[in-house]
Amino acid sequence: MAAITLQDVRVVRDGRLVLAVDHLDVRDGELLVVVGPSGSGKTTLLRSIAGLDEVTSGAVLFDATDITNVDTAERGVAMVFQDSTLFPFMNVRRNIAFPLEVRRTDKEEVDSRVEAEARVLAIEHLLARQPKQLGAGHQQLVQAARALVRVPEVFLMDEPLARLDAQLRLEMRQEFRLLQDGYKVTMIFVTNDQEEAMVMADRVVVLCEGHVRQIGSPMDLYREPASKFVAQFIGSPPMSFLSGRLELDPPGFWVSFGGFRLRAWAPALTGAGERVEVGVRAEDVVEDPDGLPVEVGRGHFLGDHGFARVQLAPDDWVQMRTTGQPPPPGSTIRVNLRQVHLFDPVTDRALGRIENQMT
Ligand code: ADP
Ligand code: MG
């Protein structure tokens, strides 16, 4: 298995910069998830690592060896795509065997490796079937088996679950995560679903318009988003945003927004302007008898918890997480905030996380 490094990689297509990665390390044996909106450069990143797309400048390294000019076939990468690329006229066994057959592997070895792989992926009973006789989930497992049968250094998956229905998608996340745990293959998994990223990843890379916006563990991204973009993208429901005012009052600041005025201090606030964006996560809005009276808007109930919109000020609504049923729309409750995130409204960058000293 290999560690992967991208150094100053730029990909230009039709005169447009579609990928610009200054530095990215993928650790040996790690499952890195790349997440970002459609068109953010996720596929381009994978294809650059696989050698299917030429990088315009910069270098791709496997275990510190520069492979930028090495052919795809020599890189030891395997890739699974969103759509099935199985050969329709070959049965499952022959599809999985194909990468070994083209390498003129001994017949007995082909059989034993195909069967071993099928066992790991629990698709042994499907070996005689034709691809069109398989459901979408099984097709993706067969694609994975075909990719893994030649023991790649690096395993790349480009939105492999995007076409599956919701329930199957949840199961397949687990399958692929367990598969990676077992093989310890260096794996990069692409998705546009932030929840999938959070569930599967050792670390997540957030891409936007070809640029890396943040790299970190799911917890880091959720708790310390580096920008409003990441804060909005990671977490469900998305963070709510309000506009706020910052006032210097040494040794710190006051931040006022939506009927609240909190003491604030973080190193980055020193250089900040008077206006800030205030981000509030739904679980940080809590009922408090001494809190601000707010009107409750529409909510929904998800089983043992729910969410409701509450109005902090005339134009300032935030999502609130509730234990059990949300309060009825139109009612008034008192709420407080456990913490807020501050962002620079011009640069989008995080200025700090402010904990509220609730009494
Ligand atoms: P994602 O996988 O995140 O949806 P892509 O990597 O496919 O994004 O595409 C990133 C950007 O590069 C998009 O704006 C897309 O239109 C552009 N792009 C991708 N491939 C090509 C190509 N072969 N020629 C021109 N533009 C391309
Ligand atoms: Mg794509």
Image (cartoon, rainbow, N blue to C red):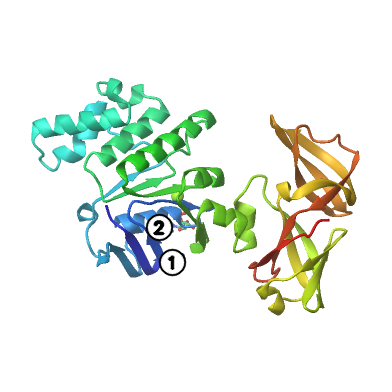
Does the residue tagged 1 have its C-beta within 8 Å of any atom of ligand 1? no
Question: Mark 2 — residue?
Answer: 45
Please name the amino acid that badge 1 sits on.
Answer: Val
Of residue 340 and residue 22, the one placed in the foreground of this image is 340
Residue drawn at the location 44% of the way across and 35% of the way down: 174
Q: Within the image, what quadrant is residue 58 found in? A: bottom left
Q: Within the image, what quadrant is residue 343 found in? A: bottom right
Along the polypeptide, which appears first: circle 2 or circle 1? Answer: 1
The percent coordinates of residue 240 (x first, y second) are 73, 53
Q: Answer left or right for 256 relative to 5.
A: right
The percent coordinates of residue 310 (x first, y second) are 83, 46
Callout 2–callout 1 Cβ contact below 8 Å: yes
Q: Is residue 323 visible?
A: yes
Does the residue tagged 2 have its C-beta within 8 Å of any atom of ligand 1? yes
Question: Mark 1 — residue?
Answer: 21
Q: Quadrant of the C terminus?
A: bottom right
Q: Within the image, what quadrant is residue 19 found in? A: bottom left
